[in-house]
Image (cartoon, coloured by chain):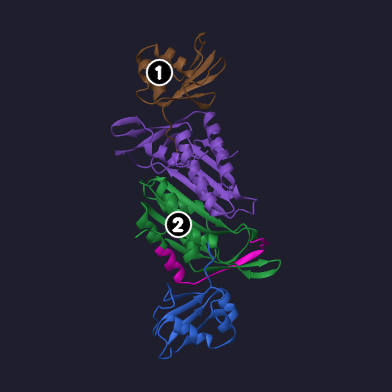
Chain colours: A purple, B green, C brown, D blue
Amino acid sequence: MPVRIQSEDFDAGREIASLRAGNAQVGAVTAFVGVVRDMNDGSVVADMELEHYPGMTEKAIAEIIEQAKSRWNIFDVMVVHRVGHLKPTDQIVLVVVSSAHRGDAFEACEFVMDYLKTRAPFWKKEQTPHGARWVESRASDDVAAARWRQKD
Amino acid sequence: MPVRIQSEDFDAGREIASLRAGNAQVGAVTAFVGVVRDMNDGSVVADMELEHYPGMTEKAIAEIIEQAKSRWNIFDVMVVHRVGHLKPTDQIVLVVVSSAHRGDAFEACEFVMDYLKTRAPFWKKEQTPHGARWVESRASDDVAAARWRQKD
Amino acid sequence: MVTLIYFARLRESLGTGSEQLVLPAGVRDLNGLRALLMARGGAWASELAGNTPVRAAVNQDMAQGETKISDGDEIAFFPPVTGG
Amino acid sequence: MVTLIYFARLRESLGTGSEQLVLPAGVRDLNGLRALLMARGGAWASELAGNTPVRAAVNQDMAQGETKISDGDEIAFFPPVTGG
């Protein structure tokens, strides 16, 4: 299963190794790790709660992965996303892409992250010194996702 | 030291963790792992020997890293490159970049790989069923590196 | 009967995470359902008015106001996503 | 005296990895040094003729034919790089 939603932490090195295991044609693996920062939108963040829509989350990410596979020459994609209670410096998300050559691996990995940011049903609630707040979506994420829109 | 040339294998997960350790402003880490393929330029590759220019290699990669830091909003870069005897599915090279946001981390990581491919003094000699051969440089690598050329 | 699910800020403001609802005969798309829920007043009216952005999914696919709904559907309302 | 270093295909064809050389008075740049080495004939002439691409570094910086060289320099000749 190329998508895992879990509360436990993950080991990027192990996921990278397992994604390319048994495929000697893999020449390039790209990985992205998203991390909880101690500051966001000008406030100190003590910790956060990540909520998701079980079922739809896996489905939305699987669709993003299929789209990446149809657009780039890549072998496999693995996405791990944590939910529940997280604190600064905790890992949130991992995207790993394997391919024969690096160009495809880089582009597909960034595409998956940009689409995940705007299409996968997760919501962050941060604890700050001014109280709890739901994180607002960013226009910059919409811009990043729009870069990948294809001409018909 | 942000550059390591070594014959031993590396653990991408450990390098990712160590690059961002102690910096709670890191929100994004990108990693690239290059791997020996069992096929190259139409021939089966049994194994290879990676030669380098000690001293200049470290210097050339350190300069690439400095250039990346001056061009993108990133915190740290780590490059590990193996030399000596390698066989298919072995890891060759690791580039890890940490930053606050993912866009900078993706671009800087790809830039470092593209420049390393054309500017760092390494040479590969492959063993194939037709005998040993020095790998020839690729025009596609020059094209990839040229993308990053800046207007004056 | 449809299943309605609310997430994140909406779940908190509306004070519920999910409910079962018998669709009145005239309600055939998301716009119609939203009008029905807003008629409850209070947080329902203010949260679903569109002053703050609200997204919806029908059977776990992103949906628009014109998206048709019918018996047995799972319909979710939530703010724009903020994962990753 | 300069130190000359050869890598990869050049090292093998020339049959040596490095040497010490006293620079003749007239040799002041890489072009001059290359002409001097080519005059040795055989693999020296064929490898350095430029039919297959050759790169050079002076004191571990990539260099061109016009790059000046002088006593104490470390000068390397090698094929285009193929790492990563």
**Range covered by the magenta-colored residues:** B41-63
Q: Residue furthest bottom?
A: D25
Q: Residue furthest right?
A: B129
The amino acid marked with disc number 1 is Gly
Q: Which mark is residue C15?
A: 1
Query: Where does label 2 land, which residue?
Result: B147
Residue situated in front as seen by the camera: A147 or A129: A147
Q: Residue at x 50, y 57 (%)?
A: B94
The amino acid marked with disc number 2 is Arg
Looking at the image, residue C77 lies above or below residue B87? above
Using the rendered view, name the quadrant where residue B66 is placed: bottom left
Nearest to the eye among marks 1 and 2: give it: 2
Residue B55: in magenta span: yes
Indicate the secondary structure of the residue bearing disc 1.
Answer: loop
Q: Chain of mark 2?
A: B
Residue situated in front as seen by the camera: B112 or D43: D43
Asked if badges 1 and 2 are on one and the same chain, I answer no
Looking at the image, residue C22 lies above or below residue D62? above
Q: Position of residue C40 (x, y in %)?
A: 39, 11
Kindly report the distance in space between the C-alpha atoms of the residues bearing marks 1 and 2.
53 Å
